[in-house]
Image: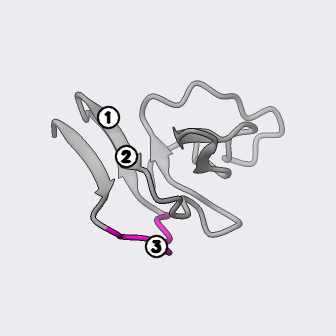
Amino acid sequence: NEYGLYFCCGAKNNIAYNNVFVNNTNWNADDALGNTWDNGIIGNYWDDYIGKDENGDGIGDTPYLVSGDNGDNFPLMEPI
């Protein structure tokens, strides 16, 4: 895909998790409205996530930022 998931046009209060974002050439996600990118336990797999998983639980130790300081706080290290 050229683009991944795009929340637009007033789309807010959505929760996106358990998704796999791979091979999107321009961006994996775009969100100007502050939607939620994890369910508080797990998030999504992002092919361009560069964080580490020091404790080996399968979840990245640092958030994947989608826009500004909003993002996935529980990025998955492997696709589902």
Of circles 1 and 2, the one toward us is 2
SS category of the residue bearing label 1: strand
Write down the quadrant of residue 26 in the picture. top left
Question: What residue occupies the far front of the structure in this picture?
Answer: 10
SS category of the residue bearing label 3: loop
- Between the C-alphas of marks 1 and 2, the distance is 7 Å
Mark 1, residue position: 27
Question: What residue occupies the far bottom of the structure in this picture?
Answer: 13
Write down the quadrant of residue 80 in the picture. bottom left
Mark 2, residue position: 30
What span is in magenta? Answer: 10-17
Q: Residues within 10 Å of mark 3 (few under 14, many from 20)?
A: few
Q: Residues within 10 Å of mark 2 (few under 14, many from 20)?
A: some
Label 3 or label 2, whichever comes before in sequence order:
3
Q: Are marks 1 and 2 in contact (CB under 8 Å)?
A: yes
Q: Are marks 3 and 2 in contact (CB under 8 Å)?
A: no
For the point 16% across and 36% down, the residue is 2
* Residue 58 location (% of width, % of height): 67, 46
Q: Amino acid at mark 1?
A: Trp
Q: Is residue 22 magenta?
A: no
Question: What residue occupies the far left of the structure in this picture?
Answer: 1
Disc ID at residue 14 = 3
47 left or right, relative to 27:
right
Q: Residues within 10 Å of mark 1 (few under 14, many from 20)?
A: some
